[in-house]
């Protein structure tokens, strides 16, 4: 038994030494770019010159060499050089796979996810099961506010990257029911094609509604797009067109490292003639990695 303990201890020490050596090698590799956030909200992007248990010396892209107290660092993560624009790190869009609500051809990466809330009532959480397959679940918790029947739904999706950051295809569905009512399953099946990358793209889609397995004979055409305007801002478009009218959403998205805000106006195109404007306001919180 004593021999077993000695072997286990030796194995643990060897793992610790290897991990330490690896960490030191990573930190001493000044060719890598790092993104560092401090507990007071400041963010720095640059190359690590040196690091010990108390201090970290960083060659920041904007302000030059800076020394940071290790106890003040909240996040330290290797940065993607492609996301550094004019010395500033542009955070990823936590909802790059959809616009206000409609999906595009991109998928959540494995382990990524987000929670979306629109006007308190619409709630959805989505997660990437693989780099191509994701699923979401949502509900309108009417029982909490009115004691009424509650709509719930799931949103499976498969994405097909034809050419990275250039052309993506996606197929999926929104299938739901109403808890508290004697209703069947209803929803829409769709296919989308997206041109562009996750920050600047245009999407065309076609969907068909269904109720209890019976599909509609008329399709729903969707057109959506987004354009990044700066470190935190996007312009967005989302629209739906059917034979008897359509709906247009215009607005924007502002992203931070741990939350994003969607805002805009909903314009129902009543017979493609009259129109009114309703507000849209939603948030998304990234989950997972």
Image (cartoon, grey):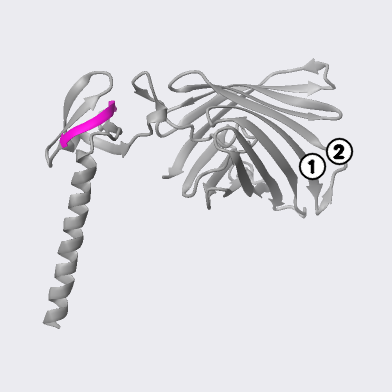
In the picture, residue 281 is in which quadrant?
top right
Q: Which residue is mark 1?
A: 208
Q: Position of residue 141 (x, y in %)?
A: 60, 44
In the picture, residue 171 is in which quadrant?
top right
Camera-nearest residue between 186 and 68: 68
Magenta stretch in the rendered image: 41-50
Q: Residue at x 85, y 44 (%)?
A: 216
Q: Position of residue 183 (x, y in %)?
A: 77, 53
The secondary element bearing badge 2 is classed as: loop
Magenta stretch: dominant SS?
strand
Tag 2 near tag 1, CB within 8 Å:
yes
Mark 2 Cα-neighbour bin, 10 Å: few <14, some 14–19, many ≥20: few
Tell whether position 258 is magenta.
Answer: no
Q: Position of residue 109 (x, y in %)?
A: 50, 45
As displayed, is residue 6 above or below residue 65?
below
Q: Which residue is mark 2?
A: 218
Q: Is residue 211 left or right of residue 224?
A: right
Q: Residue at x 47, y 37 (%)?
A: 285
Camera-nearest residue between 40 and 171: 171
């Amino acid at each position: 038994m004593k021999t077993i303990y000695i072997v286990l201890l030796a194995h643990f020490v060897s793992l610790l030494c290897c991990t330490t050596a690896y960490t030191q090698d990573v930190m001493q590799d000044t060719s890598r770019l790092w993104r560092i956030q401090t507990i007071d909200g400041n963010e720095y992007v640059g190359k690590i010159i040196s690091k010990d248990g108390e201090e970290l010396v960083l060659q920041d892209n904007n302000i030059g060499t800076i020394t940071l107290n290790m106890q003040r660092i909240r996040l330290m993560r290797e940065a993607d050089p492609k996301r550094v624009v004019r010395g500033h790190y542009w955070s990823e869009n936590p909802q790059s796979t959809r616009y206000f609500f409609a999906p595009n051809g991109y998928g959540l990466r494995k382990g990524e996810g987000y929670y979306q809330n629109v006007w308190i009532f619409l709630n959805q959480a989505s997660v990437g099961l693989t780099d191509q397959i994701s699923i979401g679940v949502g509900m309108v918790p009417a029982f909490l506010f009115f004691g009424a029947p509650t709509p719930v739904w799931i949103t499976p999706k498969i994405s097909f990257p034809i050419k990275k950051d250039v052309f993506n295809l996606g197929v999926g569905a929104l299938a739901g029911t109403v808890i508290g009512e004697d209703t069947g399953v209803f929803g829409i099946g769709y296919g989308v094609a997206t041109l562009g990358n996750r920050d600047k793209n245009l999407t065309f889609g076609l969907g068909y509604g269904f109720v209890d397995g019976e599909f509609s004979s008329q399709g729903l055409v969707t057109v959506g797009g987004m354009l990044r305007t700066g470190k935190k801002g996007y312009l967005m478009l989302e629209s739906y067109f059917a034979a008897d009218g359509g709906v247009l959403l215009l607005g924007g998205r502002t992203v931070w490292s741990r939350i994003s805000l969607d805002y805009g106006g909903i314009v129902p195109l009543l017979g493609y003639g009259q129109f009114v404007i309703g507000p849209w306001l939603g948030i998304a919180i990234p989950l997972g990695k």
